[in-house]
Image (cartoon, rainbow, N blue to C red):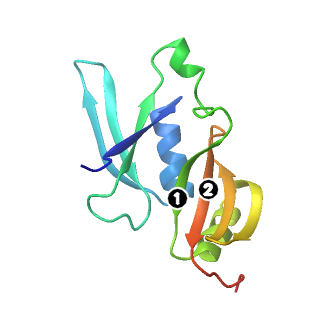
Amino acid sequence: MRLAHVTLVVADYDEALAWYCGKLGFSLVSDEYQPEQDKRWVVIAPPGALAGSATILLARASSPEQAATIGNQTGGRVFLFLETDDFWRDYQAWQAAGVRFVREPARAPYGTVAVFEDLYGNRWDLIEYGQVPGPA
């Protein structure tokens, strides 16, 4: 078994695609209309994701209960952990793109990490595991 997708509830497919693909460089894996449910099947993957890696399913909220979870799917905790092979490259590029970091980079025994918020306020870790030198 493997984890195939993680659902991220969003307000709008296109604004979410613009943010994740435009600012973070994610790839669009699938965007297919499903007429029987009047929704889209929108799947994205982080830059450099390996074939068979888990992807993110963007799911537009379809009820007030779902809409209430947008930006707070984990009660304010970090929701997703995005591993990078070059922390400082991605951190600096995303800062330049206007990504909001709510915790500055820190070194920990497991690597270098910073917390950012997506367009809705969900918190993510950007993390490079292992011993990491400082910025270039």
- Residues at marks 1 and 2 touching, judged by CB atoms closer than 8 Å: yes
Whether residue 97 is visible, yes or no, is yes
Q: Amino acid at mark 2?
A: Asp
In the image, 82: left or right of 99?
left
What residue is disc 1 on? 82
Q: Is residue 41 above or below residue 69?
A: below
Three-letter amino acid code at the position of disc 1: Leu
Badge count: 2
Q: Locate the C terminus by quadrant.
A: bottom right
Q: Image check: 28 left or right of 17?
A: left
Image point 68% across, 55% down: which residue? 115
Which one is earlier in the sequence, the residue at label 1 or at label 2? 1
Q: Residue at x 33, y 25 (%)?
A: 39
- Badge 2 marks a residue whose secondary structure is strand
Asked whether residue 99 is in view, the answer is no
Secondary structure beneath dot 1 equals strand
Residue 2 screen position, x and y as percent? 28, 50
- What number is the disc on residue 40? none
At a point 42% along the width and 31% down the height, the residue shown is: 59
